[in-house]
Image (cartoon, helix red, strand yellow):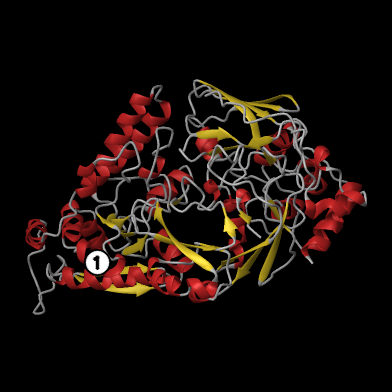
Amino acid sequence: MFKTTHRMFLAAALVTISGLPATAEIPANLQETPYWEAEVESGGLPPIAERIPQEPLIVDLAAKGRDFGTPGGTLRTMVTRSKDIRQMVVYGYARLVGFDHDYDIVPDLLASFENEDNRKFTLNLRPGHKWSDGTPFTSEDFRYWWEDVANNELLSPSGPPDFLLVEGKPPTVSFPDETTIMFEWENPNPDFLQSLAQARPPFIYRPSEFLKKYHEKFADPEELAFHVEDARVKSWAALHNKLDNLYKYDNHELPTLQPWFNASSGKKIRYGFIRNPYYHRVDSNGVQLPYIDVVEMEIVAPGLVAAKTNAGESDLQGRGLAFRDASILKKGEAEGGYKTLLWKTGVASQIAIYPNLNFEDEAWRNILRDVRVRRALSLAIDRKTINQALYFKLAHPGAMSVLPTSPFYDEANAKAWAEYDVDMANALLDEAGLTERDRDGVRLLPDGRPMELVIETAGERQEVENALQIVTDTWREIGVDLVMRPLDRDILRNRVFSGNTMASVWFGWDDGIPQMHTSPAYLAPTDQVFLSWPKWGQYYQTNGGSGEPPDMPEAELLMKLAHDWEVATTDDERAAVWTEMLKIHADQLYAIGILNGAPQPIVVSNRLRNVPEQAMWAWEPGAHFGIHRPDEFFFAD
């Protein structure tokens, strides 16, 4: 079904720091992909030598310790929401530049790049590279995005994305020829390449030939008006933005550069993704990647992922599985035809409590802003018991900080205020003036209300509720009554962002393994998604249009340090900024980490090859499966 669908797409399309070059000439032993042989023979698709770039990315699997694969097969996996089909962009991990296994930034879609003092970046494309519909991928796609999308007030009311603004100024962007793009700033932009390598990258290019049909500057006015009316939207800009979804991946007509493209239109229970016939990666035996022909992604209820995986209904599964599922998954291995791996996790904390320093209740806000209170709450958590009960001692108790694999790891930060010490916690709360208690031993706020600390959760992870039950018992020893309130994820976030949530629970920083080139902006109040300071983040994100400016000295210092990192000119200066920012977090406890490194179950079909036995499951950096290159996975039979 999916193959037939794409034949129609192809027919329509045919009518209509110096990066080391990761390129090579087209191999002499280039092989036609079996999946597309009939299409090539019928003339519906050019032969393989005309589909790949003149300088494809040649993957030396032997050097990576991997096996050469055989093309073919359908890989089954699951997600729990329709919008999570975007994980195919995450897992596909085709980026202009990407992280390798050592977390170095290397060219991918790009043939190479040059970095001149973090001020001028030259991006060199692969000659002959094409989108999934066969149209050329050239500098025109970058020019179209920059001039006609990012700087079009109707399509981008806020202007170019923040990561391109340095000291409030956009770059000078030029396009010397069809394979060269230059970004140049007056001041350094050291986060530029790292941003391009993210799990959710800022796409600084667009399939211009496709989207120009929906842009008032290029489209025939009558045809564009017809498209707008047919789509039942208010304007051409609304239609353009609706169709322009390289990350959401819900427009099956939109060309892509990922290894698999969406071949399913409309809402589905099961989506099909077909191998991109113009994909730029080729193994050294002359076989075009990806090896796997089709990926089927099924939408299932969250509570069914483990059960269906246990029944052998997924060939590769990480998302939707938790450590508590590991034992039942292990028991089902023989009958289900799979094995269960335990990968390390890359988040800074598996479970972290976020006191909302922007909570709308003034009395509670003042309490939560007292660092002595936050330290007391942290000291009154029995992390070892939680680790034993939830993870069989396989996780690492500690405060929220970076993990040992980061060059910025400091054991003192990881242990700061993280020892279980009820006496010290009680002393700190007394020192904070919370000495009065009710007859049940619960401390009283200055206005006489009991110290009932309401922690809201997304209700998606059983280990969170289990951990908070243990915290409830130990906090009772310091006179704090923990009240847990599960909510839908979107409702929870909206409540936090509006200041209606007293405290919440989520993972720690997505990137718990920052490297020297990683921006520390997420340690400063630059984003509302850090749930301890949503309104400070809103203020920064909207240039003061909404939210509140940071009004605590340490938070203001974090903002200054984040800026210092941006303008630094040496690695030593940037490392010093990281060190100081991490120390502030360890001292101030803006988020109360409980433990990190909890194993992530990864279920792999016994037929699937090249999936690493030991690896890191991380959103940033790494894009979950993405950094491990699923386009190199293959079925042995």
Give the x, y percent position of residue 589.
24, 51
* Image quadrant occupied by the C terminus: bottom right
Number of residues whose C-alpha sits closer than 10 Å to that of mark 1, classed few (under 14), some (14–19) or many (20 or more): few
Question: Which residue is at the front of the view, 38 or 185?
Answer: 38
- Report x, y in % for residue 45: 86, 48
User: Is 176 positioned to the left or the right of 394 in the image?
Assistant: right
Residue in front for this viewpoint, 406 or 176: 406
| Residue 395 seen in the current view | yes
Residue 278 appears left or right of 203: right
Q: Which amino acid does label 1 sit on?
A: Gln
At x 79%, y 52%, the residue is 34
Image quadrant of residue 365?
bottom left
Image location (x, y in percent) of residue 550:
33, 45
Q: Can residue 216 be seen in this view?
A: no
Q: Please state, as top left, top right, bottom left or bottom right, where the N terminus lies in the image.
A: bottom right
Label 1, on which residue?
388
Residue 219 at x, y percent in the picture? 85, 45
Front residue of this view, candidates 266 and 350: 350
Label 1: state its secondary structure.
helix
- Vertical placement of 25 versus 621: above or below? above
Q: What residue occupies the far bottom of the structure in this picture?
A: 439
Horizontal side, residue 162 vs residue 326: left or right: right
